[in-house]
Image (tube, rainbow, N blue to C red):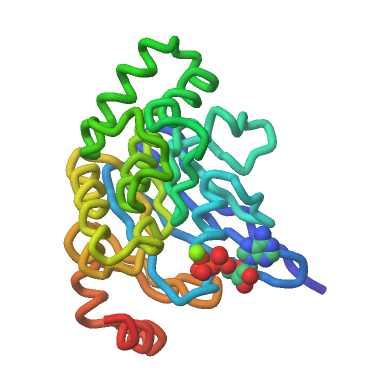
Amino acid sequence: MTTTPPAPEVQPEAGAPAIQVLDLHKSFGENEVLKGINFHVDHAEVVCVIGPSGSGKSTLLRCVNRLEEPTSGKIIVEGIDITDEETDLDKVRTRIGMVFQQFNLFPHMTVLRNLTIAQQRAKKRDRAEAEAIARENLEKVGMADREDAFPAHLSGGQQQRVAIARALSMNPDMMLFDEPTSALDPELVGDVLDVMKALAGSGMTMMVVTHEMGFAREVGDKLVFMDGGVIVEEGDPVEVLANPQHQRTQSFLSKVL
Ligand code: ADP
Ligand code: MG
C-alpha cells in the first residue's frame, strides 16, 4: 500500500515570494528529470543555478514559466498558482521574461521590430508607444544605435543583449536566464554579464542558470547546486563556492573552477 504525502502548504498572496516551487516533479516518459524540487526566490533576489549537464536546470526554468508542464507539485509566481489549470498562462508568461542560450531573435525582422512585435500583440500597445519602450530598453543594453540592423549582422553578444532588451520591453516582474553566455565567444561574455549585473542592480528578480562562477559569486544572492534532478546544496554563493558541504558539489566545482 502506498501513502500519498499531504499537499504542500500554499502561502497567501500578500507577502508571497516572487517564485515558490513546492515539491516539483517532472518526468519525460519513464525519465524522472526533476525529483522533488523545493525553493523560493524573493523579490529583487538573484538566484544562480549551477550543475552538470542533464541535471534538470533547463527543465526547472521551463517549468517556472510553464513552457513545460510539471508532472506534480506546485509553482506559485507572485502569489498565483501557475500549476492550477484555471490560471491564464498567457498572462503569467508576459510577467516572466526569458532569455535563452540561443538568443531566438526573429531573423527576418530588424532589431526594433523584434522588440515591438510582442508588445503590440500581447500588450496591445500602439506602434509609437512600443517603439518608445523598445528604444529605452535598447539604450539600457547599449544597442540603441543598431535598431535597424538584422540579427545576422550582429555579434552573438549583441544579439543576446537585444534578446534581453526584448524581454524587458514586456515589463516583466522577473527574468529567467538559461545559460545566456554559453553560446558566446569568450570576449563577448563580459558585455552580456555587465547588462545582467546592471539589471540585478536595478532590483530585477532573476533566476540565472550559468557556468559563470564569477558572476554567481559577485551578483548572486543565492546559489543553487543541482545534480540528478535534486537540489543538492544551496546557500550564499561566496560560501558555497569557497566551502561546498557536499561531495557532489565539491566534485562539480573542482571541475569548473
Ligand atoms: P540541464 O539543463 O541541466 O542540462 P535539462 O533540463 O535540459 O538539463 O535535461 C535534463 C534531462 O531531461 C535530460 O536527460 C534530457 O534528456 C531530458 N529532457 C529535457 N527535455 C526533454 C524533452 N522535451 N523530452 C524528453 N526528455 C527531455
Ligand atoms: Mg540546460
Farthest residue, direction right: 1
Judge left or right: residue 151 versus residue 218: right
Q: Residue at x 43, y 23 (%)?
A: 116
Does residue 169 sit above or below 244 in this rendering? above
Does residue 204 sit above or below 72 in this rendering? above
Residue 176 seen in render: yes
Q: Quadrant of the N terminus?
A: bottom right
The location of residue 224, given as percent across then percent down, is: 37, 67
Q: Residue at x 50, y 14 (%)?
A: 124
Considering depth in this image, is 50 or 117 the residue closer to the camera? 117
Q: Quadrant of the C terminus?
A: bottom left
Judge left or right: residue 84 versus residue 178: right
The location of residue 234, given as percent across then percent down, is: 34, 69
The location of residue 220, given as percent across then percent down, is: 24, 58
Residue 27 seen in render: no
Q: Residue at x 35, y 37 (%)?
A: 15
The location of residue 213, given as percent across then percent down, is: 26, 70
Q: Residue at x 28, y 30 (%)?
A: 137
Does residue 91 sit above or below 51 in this rendering? above
Considering depth in this image, is 160 or 121 the residue closer to the camera? 160
Farthest residue, direction front: 153
Q: How many marks?
A: 0
